[in-house]
Amino acid sequence: MDSRVLYEASFVFQPAWLLMLLIGAVWVTGTILTLKSGKPPKGERRETPLWVFVVGLIILAFVYIRVIPDQINMYNATVGAYHRGEYQVVEGYVEDYHPMPKEGHDQESFTINGVTFEYSDYTVQFGYHNTKPYGGVITEDGQHLKIGYTNYKKLGNVIVYIEEFP
């Protein structure tokens, strides 16, 4: 029986990371320029108070300390586990398929042999999360699939491999 691989987990750059780095760079640059400008002339006020920059740096540091390690952990627990062969496999037919509507604001989900999968294009995560409206390969009940997956924290079963049988 011929089959075809529809998806294999690999490293994918997340655009949110670039946005986080850009925001951080702008905030740090703004803080440095504010500190270097010294005190404003007597009788004038600085446009942006220094405490705004300092509080922003504290928030930014908290986000970097919290988010970056979580992203690394998610990568290791999903894509890393796949490449190490540390994942589970379920094979069967897609049941209870619930597609995400084109307007979004929902999760796409399905079950194979009692194992449920949920995902969305709007979740920053590693692993398969392409919904039908955005070119996803899981499209209907009855598809015969072999799914490799790991379980990760709040995301539940994360798909790391999809093979389709005719």
Image (cartoon, rainbow, N blue to C red):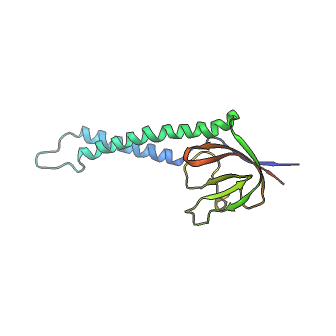
On the image, the x and y values in percent for residue 127 come to 63, 46
Q: Residue at x 43, y 45 (%)?
A: 22
Q: Is residue 107 above or below residue 128?
A: below
Q: Residue at x 57, y 63 (%)?
A: 104
> Can the viewer see residue 153?
yes
On the image, the x and y values in percent for residue 47 come to 23, 51
On the image, the x and y values in percent for residue 158 come to 63, 46
In front: 128, or 77? Answer: 77
Which quadrant of the view contains residue 89? top right
On the image, the x and y values in percent for residue 130 come to 64, 54
Residue located farthest toward the top when viewing the structure as drawn: 84
Residue located farthest toward the left when viewing the structure as drawn: 43
Q: Is residue 166 left or right of residue 18?
A: right
Residue located farthest toward the front when viewing the structure as drawn: 114
How many dots with numbers? 0
Q: Residue at x 43, y 37 (%)?
A: 65
Q: Is residue 78 left or right of residue 27?
A: right
In front: 127, or 36? Answer: 127
> Can the viewer see residue 136?
no
Q: Is residue 30 left or right of residue 41?
A: right
Quarter holding the C terminus is: bottom right
Q: Residue at x 74, y 52 (%)?
A: 113
